[in-house]
């Protein structure tokens, strides 16, 4: 019974797991780069949710075929393309901030940065 | 007719303007700020025209590319949208004039990225307000946020870590919003706000809708810096360039509140969030705690910008309190407080920027004699502070009056006490500045006023704060009409 749910909905379980890992990375890690990695995992887990929700079992790609066929829902994929662009830009801003912080403070450790900026 | 396309032009003008800013900057660097002011002036004029059109002819619905909603993206403008549009565009325009000197001093030789980002920030905020598509709202929110992170990071050494923390918090909030939108989309199969609100009532029993509401409320509360989630705000506002702090405090948090109102009261029906699930009363209690906590924290600060930042946390509580009580009077007061807090807080931040520009002083105990040195600037500061405390005839009095009246009408005595107590606390933390600036030691201090391009916007905000306080029936009329249409 429980196993059935796990096997039927495993991608949703993976999405929640990834989200938790990303959240931990953002909060628990003291290194700024690791925080950024956590942030990316957090964002990408949501993309997995969207794409999983779009899936139709046995569905093909949403292109025009001669005979009628079952399609997966294309709209979430398009939304996630937009969201990926947003995530990449956020990561770029984050990394450039990290470079500036490293030049300014000489370290990426959050505790040391807090000490230095007193 | 071009007037049919105004609701999309307000975005298109901004995006094109931001694109051409670096090109203009390559020809002549000094032109950048003028160009930004010009573009934002255009957006301001369009927003005024949109408000006029909505008042005259009713709601505007624009179909992007001619695709009929719910398949295409719709830009829907009603009274609330148009009202917030005018506030946002107006403030961005005034601060862009002010910022010519202020930003030139605090962020020298970075005109190209600075003004490109400034226009993008404005456009992102206007986009959040004008759109009628819930995913579009997320995209504009991220455009605005990314511009804001970069703008904050231009403030120097300490602003880098402030911006990094804001980015982490902001990304968590945006991800929650995206996830909430995803849950709503999975349940209804549409992204158009009007369409979702038509399809949702049959689904209200499902737990997924509850999760979606929880995610959206938490996400937007981080963006608006509601009290326990405000931790990014003080650092970001303190260390950002003064003009950027002014814009962010005046408009960015307000736009988040607008999004929350839009999602809670028009996408999800008011009766569900008020009666079935007590989201709104929880929000109002959190806001009441935030009002007091923000004021108390502000009293403990000695940096003028940090004090204003904590004061923002407290004032955002007022807006949430009004929305959370969700009766007509309190809601009107809450939405009016969006306008009044924008006006006075932008004015106060601009004064802080002018003081930093002239003297470099940030500690409020070193402001002695400032009343003699910069009389007009400090006069504007006094008016803004009086409006903050809620003394008639300023606009701050009108919105606090409506909030208290609404709380009395709902029989919420605790909230009335909170509003009055916080007004006293506000008086306490502004009094320290009055005392130092006007009643300090009287040495021979020469008058050394801020330059005219900074002084004009500051005085304009002070005058408008008083004028709108006298003519408060104008904005109240618009808001009341919207509130009556939404609340049962």
Image: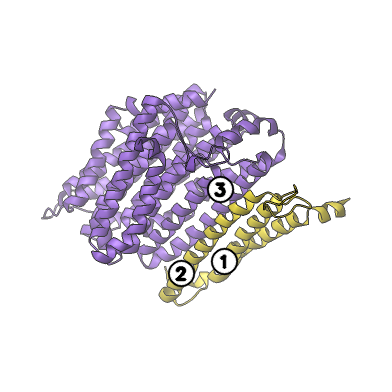
Q: Are marks 1 and 3 on the same chain?
A: no
Rendered image quadrant of residue B152: bottom left
Quarter of the image with the N terminus of chain B is top left
In the rendered image of this protein, does residue B455 appear above or below residue A19?
Answer: above
Disc number placed over residue B150 in the picture, else none? none
Provide the residue designation for mark 2: A96
Name chain B's colour.
purple
Host chain of mark 3:
B
User: B91 and B334: which one is in front?
Assistant: B91
Q: Residue B122 versus residue A100: which sits nearer the camera?
A: B122
Q: Chain of mark 1?
A: A
Which residue carries the number 1 mark?
Answer: A35
In front: label 1 or label 2:
2
* Label 1: how many Cα within 10 Å (few below 14, some 14–19, many 20+): many
- Where residue B313 appears, as percent x and y from the top left, is 44, 46
Q: Colour of chain A?
A: yellow
Instruction: Measure the alpha-carbon separation of dots 2 and 3.
Output: 25 Å
Distance between the alpha carbons at the discs numbered 1 and 3: 19 Å
The image's mark for residue B219 is: 3
Q: Chain of mark 2?
A: A
Q: Are marks 1 and 2 in contact (CB under 8 Å)?
A: no
Which of discs 2 and 3 lies nearer the camera? The answer is 2
Q: Position of residue B283 (x, y in %)?
A: 55, 38
Please name whichever residue, B155 or A14, is drawn nearer the observer in this view of the structure: A14
Residue B187 location in percent, x, y?
Answer: 68, 40
1 or 2: tag closer to the N-terminus: 1
């Amino acid at each position: 019974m429980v196993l059935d749910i796990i096997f039927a909905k495993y991608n949703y379980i993976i999405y929640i797991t990834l989200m938790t890992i990303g959240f931990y990375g953002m909060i628990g890690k003291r290194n700024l780069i690791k925080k950024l990695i956590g942030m990316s995992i957090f964002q990408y887990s949501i993309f997995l949710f969207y794409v999983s929700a779009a899936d139709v079992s046995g569905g093909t790609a949403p292109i025009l075929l001669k005979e009628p066929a079952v399609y997966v829902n294309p709209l979430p994929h398009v939304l996630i393309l937009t969201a990926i662009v947003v995530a990449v830009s956020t990561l770029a801003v984050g990394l450039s901030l990290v470079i500036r912080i490293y030049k300014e403070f000489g370290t990426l450790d959050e505790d040391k940065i807090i000490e230095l900026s007193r | 007719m071009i007037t049919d396309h105004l609701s999309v032009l307000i975005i298109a003008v901004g995006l094109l303007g931001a694109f051409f800013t670096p090109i203009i900057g390559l020809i002549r660097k000094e032109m950048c700020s003028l160009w930004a002011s010009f573009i934002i002036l255009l957006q301001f004029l369009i927003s005024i025209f949109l408000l006029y059109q909505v008042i005259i002819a009713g709601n505007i619905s624009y179909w992007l590319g001619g695709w009929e909603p719910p398949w295409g993206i719709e830009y829907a403008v009603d009274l609330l949208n148009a009202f917030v549009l005018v506030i946002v565009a107006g403030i961005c325009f005034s601060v862009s004039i002010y910022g010519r000197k202020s930003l030139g001093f605090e962020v020298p030789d970075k005109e190209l990225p600075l003004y490109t980002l400034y226009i993008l920030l404005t456009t992102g905020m206007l986009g959040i307000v004008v759109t009628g598509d819930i995913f579009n709202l997320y995209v504009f929110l991220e455009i605005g946020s990314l511009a804001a992170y970069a703008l904050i990071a231009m403030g120097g050494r300490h602003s880098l870590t402030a911006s990094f923390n804001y980015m982490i918090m902001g990304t968590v909030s945006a991800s929650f919003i995206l996830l909430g939108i995803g849950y709503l989309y999975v349940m209804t199969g549409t992204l158009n706000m009007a369409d979702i609100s038509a399809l949702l009532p049959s689904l209200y029993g499902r737990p997924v809708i509850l999760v979606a509401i929880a995610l959206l409320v938490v996400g937007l509360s981080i963006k608006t810096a509601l009290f326990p989630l405000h931790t990014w705000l003080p650092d970001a506002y303190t260390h950002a360039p003064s003009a950027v702090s002014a814009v962010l405090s005046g408009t960015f948090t307000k736009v988040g509140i607008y999004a929350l109102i839009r999602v809670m009261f028009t996408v999800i029906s008011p009766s569900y969030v008020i009666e079935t699930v007590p989201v709104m009363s929880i929000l109002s209690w959190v806001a009441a705690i935030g009002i007091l906590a923000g004021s108390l924290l502000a009293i403990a600060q000695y940096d003028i910008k940090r004090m204003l930042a904590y004061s923002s946390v407290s004032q955002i509580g007022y807006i949430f309190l009004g929305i959370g009580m969700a009766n007509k009077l309190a809601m009107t007061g809450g939405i009016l407080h969006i306008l009044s807090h924008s006006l006075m807080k932008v004015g106060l931040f601009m004064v802080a920027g002018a003081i930093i520009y002239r003297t470099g002083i940030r500690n409020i105990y070193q402001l002695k004699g400032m009343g003699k040195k910069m009389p007009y600037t400090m006069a504007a500061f006094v008016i803004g502070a009086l409006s903050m405390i809620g003394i008639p005839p300023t606009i701050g009095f009108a919105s606090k009056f409506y909030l208290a009246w609404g709380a009395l009408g709902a029989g919420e005595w605790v909230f009335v006490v909170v509003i009055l107590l916080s007004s006293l606390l506000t008086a306490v933390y502004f009094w320290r500045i009055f005392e130092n600036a006007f009643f300090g030691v009287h040495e021979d201090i020469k008058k050394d006023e801020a330059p005219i391009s900074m002084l004009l916007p500051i005085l304009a905000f002070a005058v408008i704060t008083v004028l709108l306080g006298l003519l408060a029936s104008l904005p109240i009329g618009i808001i009341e009409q919207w509130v009556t249409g939404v609340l049962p």
